[in-house]
Image: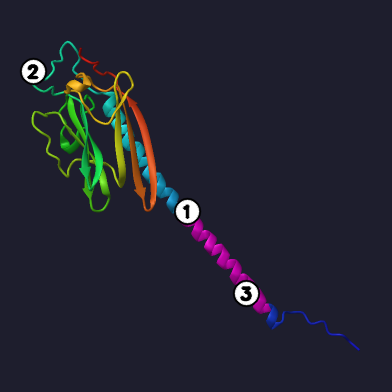
Amino acid sequence: MVSVNREGFTLIEILIALFIFSMVVSVVFISFREIAFSAGVVNKSNDDYEMAYGCFELMRRDLASIHVTQKPFYRSPDHSDKDPYRFQGKTEIEGGEAFPVLRFTTLCHLPVNRDNRKGIAEVVYYTDEIEEYGTVLRRADRVIFDEELVRRKTHPVILRKIKSMAVTYYDEEGREHDEWDSEDRDAGYATPSALKIRVEIVDDEKVLPFETRIVLRPFREKTS
């Protein structure tokens, strides 16, 4: 008798192979989707870190070039008009939360809004509300500041999606203060020697904290 050697697969074997193949494809697709999603989250987080880093670097540059009226040229408001080069840090309520407002003068004038004039500039950092980005930080910059600043939507936004922000001011002895006014007798008519900036920004449901400390050189010591 001659035996016949039949090669091939049965229908059951083919169905099992197709099932296994479909499972492998599903696992690969899910893994690829997770990797793509993770890459998107990383890129978005990188954008947030770069935005916060850029904000801190701009503030650091402004404060590194701070202009302060030094003694004996400084005259307290008891004996003259308010110092145009005063340093002020206060808090305001925005959207039910307290946010800082920082005002000082600096040699670091940026030619925003086609203002190419040179000189000592008044810089004001303040928060605002935008429907698309929530609480944002704006920077106002002008070289003529003999009148009260009018806040405008044209002032550049340098930080978005702010959940919280606080500034701590340090006197020459290193003591902490929540607010500062160099025209105030309680501050000894001095400017702060350093400040610490803390901010939290929101990325979807994730909160990203950032903090930096900036030493001010020069600063005006207390007036006895």
Q: Which residue is mark 3?
A: 19
Q: Which element carries disc 2, helix, strand or loop? A: loop
Residue 63, image x and y in percent?
A: 27, 26
| Image: 133 above or below 145 | below
| Disc nearer the start of the sequence (1/2) | 1
Q: Which element carries disc 1, helix, strand or loop? A: helix
Q: Name the residue nearer the viewer: 51 or 7.
A: 51
Q: Which residue is mark 2?
A: 80
**Residue furthest toward the top?**
72
| Image: 45 above or below 64 | below
Q: Which element carries disc 3, helix, strand or loop? A: helix
Residues under numbered marks 2 and 3 in contact, where contact means CB atoms less than 8 Å apart? no
Crowding at mark 3 (Cα within 10 Å: few <14, some 14-19, many 20+): few
Asked whether, in this view, residue 222 is left or right of residue 32, the answer is left
Residue 71, image x and y in percent?
A: 19, 12
The image quarter in which residue 10 lies: bottom right
Crowding at mark 1 (Cα within 10 Å: few <14, some 14-19, many 20+): few
Q: Which residues are magenta?
A: 14-37
Residue 38 is labelled as 1
Q: Inspect the magenta stretch and tell me whether residue 114 lies in it.
A: no
Three-letter amino acid code of the residue under disc 1:
Ser
Q: Dominant secondary structure of the magenta stretch? A: helix
Q: Quadrant of the N terminus?
A: bottom right
Q: CA distance from mark 1 to mark 3?
A: 29 Å
Residue 148, image x and y in percent?
A: 10, 33
Query: Which residue occupies 22% across, 24% down?
Result: 107
| Disc nearer the start of the sequence (2/3) | 3
**Residue furthest toward the bottom?**
1
Query: Which residue occupies 68% across, 83% down?
Result: 11
Asked whether, in this view, residue 22 is left or right of residue 107, the answer is right
